[in-house]
Amino acid sequence: MRLSIIAPCYNEADNIAELRRQLVDVARRLTTDPEYALDDVEFVFVDDGSRDATLDRLKAWAGEDSRVHVVALSRNFGHQAALSAGIDHATGDAVVVMDADLQHPPELILEFVRKWRAGYDLVYAYREGVKPRFGYRLINTLMKIHVPAEAADFRLMARPMVNAFRRMPEHARFIRGMMSWLGFRQIGVGYTDRDRFAGERAFTVRQTAQMALNAVLSFSNLPLRVASLAGLLTILCGCCYAAFILYHYLFGDASKIQPGWTALIMTVLVLGGVQLLCLGIIAEYIGRIFEEVKQRPLYVVRELIGKPRDDSPGE
Ligand code: UDP
Ligand code: MG
């Protein structure tokens, strides 16, 4: 049995040495301890267009260790695309994905492997002692999927699940949600998040917002329904108001219908607002359809070091 350990790296130069120390140790235990009895461990690092010495350090490591493979992307494609690149290039019977900044404790991989050996297809890590963020509760309530609260992008996937995942070509990726959609036998393992070993968080507010939007729009049509609902409600209000006017017109008290300016302007504004809102929501979905029909590859590989398997889609 062979295990692949994948980490996307974006400007992680100062973390590589420590990551190497810890991963090499975990790999040694996995292959020598009879409890795990793995034949082989490989490492697949994806350099996501880093601007620092990350790629050089990874190359140096690959030069000294034949288990190390590096997929260098042509530019920064973002965490979720880099993860997918790693998964496409992994050959193991199970695949572990983790961050390169040591926030995900490598020794947890031992527990992952134990659970995998016990028959689970997906073992995911979740941060213990953290209250589920509002975003996750919202996703779970509104979407048709269940994303475990505070699940991290730190997990082990067995080969059948990896293959199923690789058949999901969508661009707007919310991998945690996709995992949940896939099903299989899943189990969580708790851990406490640590601080980054070195370097700074690479995610911008924009990327985080984008991910939240992906989660909502890729997994539900609810926003589309909200649009129709808002439209319906507005029509209802309009009808009630019309009935009110008609009633007073027919049965006297015309003063009530008098200078209709305020009502008129209000109606125009509300209706205009609702229409714009609905248009906006529909435009979001159309934008996504456009993104997907272009069928561009998720990422572009510039260089493969240490010859990882190369059958990524579209190449
Ligand atoms: N990462 C990446 N591309 C990016 C941003 C981040 O490959 O555009 C990698 C990064 O090197 C790290 C992981 O994704 O290994 C998680 O990133 P980060 O630590 O910045 O996010 P956080 O842990 O704060 O969510
Ligand atoms: Mg991090």
Image (cartoon, rainbow, N blue to C red):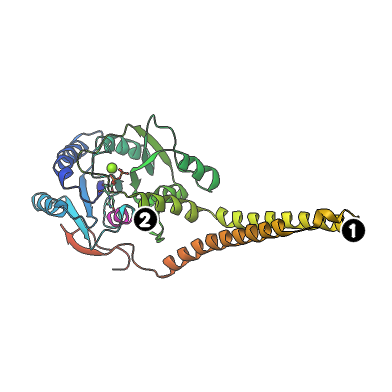
The residue lying toward the viewer, choosing from 183 and 259, is 259
Q: Is residue 117 magenta?
A: no
Residue highlighted by disc 2 = 163
Identify which amino acid the numbered label 2 is placed on: Asn
The residue lying toward the viewer, choosing from 258 and 226, is 258
Question: Element type at marker 1?
Answer: helix
Residue highlighted by disc 1 = 250
Q: Which badge, 2 or 1, is on the more N-terminal residue? A: 2
Residue 152 drawn above or below residue 300: above
Residue 257 coordinates in the image, percent (x, y): 80, 57
The residue lying toward the viewer, choosing from 291 and 164, is 291
Residue 141 coordinates in the image, percent (x, y): 54, 43
Q: Give the residue at x 31% y 34%.
A: 193
Q: Give the residue at x 23% y 42%.
A: 101
Q: Main secondary structure of the magenta part?
A: helix
* Residue numbers of the magenta segment: 81-86
Q: Which of marks 2 and 1 is in front?
A: 1
